[in-house]
Amino acid sequence: MSTIDQQFVEYIVKSLVGHPGDVSVERQIDEKGVLLSLTVNPEDLGRVIGKRGVTAQSLRTLLRALGTKNDARYNLKIVNNDDQRENYTISSDNTSGEAVKNSTDEPVDNGYDYSKKTREELAELDDLDI
């Protein structure tokens, strides 16, 4: 039996995605409040997250309004089950809307080396007399 918050998220997400039959919302209660884990078809993940996480953030805003009415704190976690390779999630702690790897076994490549190399190349170009 699903609760009003699960039905609310399912209704909104099913309206957005191309595979509404693959939408599922699991509900867990923890010390931080109510955690809703949203699983969608991998093809629809981009639609649910939106550009720069705008759609996901809007879902969280609507849940916050529902939480105000129900005196509850809701957290939304969007689970990526693509190819079962590695589990990535989009949680309310990550405000950028980017996928974050759950495993801590490998160092995270945040593009630091690439940006450092680019800055060095630009500095070399500044030294040229043209």
Image (cartoon, grey):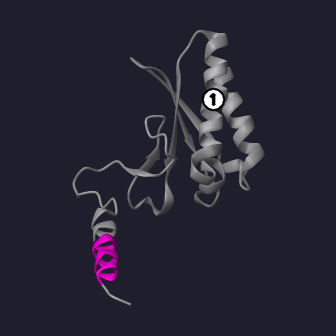
| Element type at mark 1 | helix
> Which is the main secondary structure of the residues drawn in magenta?
helix
54 shown above or below 2 = below
28 shown above or below 86 = above
Residue at x 65%, y 36% (from the top left corner):
58
Write down the region rendered in magenta.
117-127
The residue furthest bottom is 130
Residue at x 50%, y 60% (from the top left corner):
82
Residue at x 48%, y 34% (from the top left corner):
92
Q: Is residue 1 visible?
A: no
Residue 118, given in percent of the width and then of the height, sits at 34, 73
Q: Quadrant of residue 120?
A: bottom left
Q: Which residue in the protein does label 1 denote?
A: 61
Residue 68 left/right relative to 75: right
- Name the kind of residue labelled 1 in the image: Thr
Q: Would you say residue 10 sits in the magenta stretch?
A: no
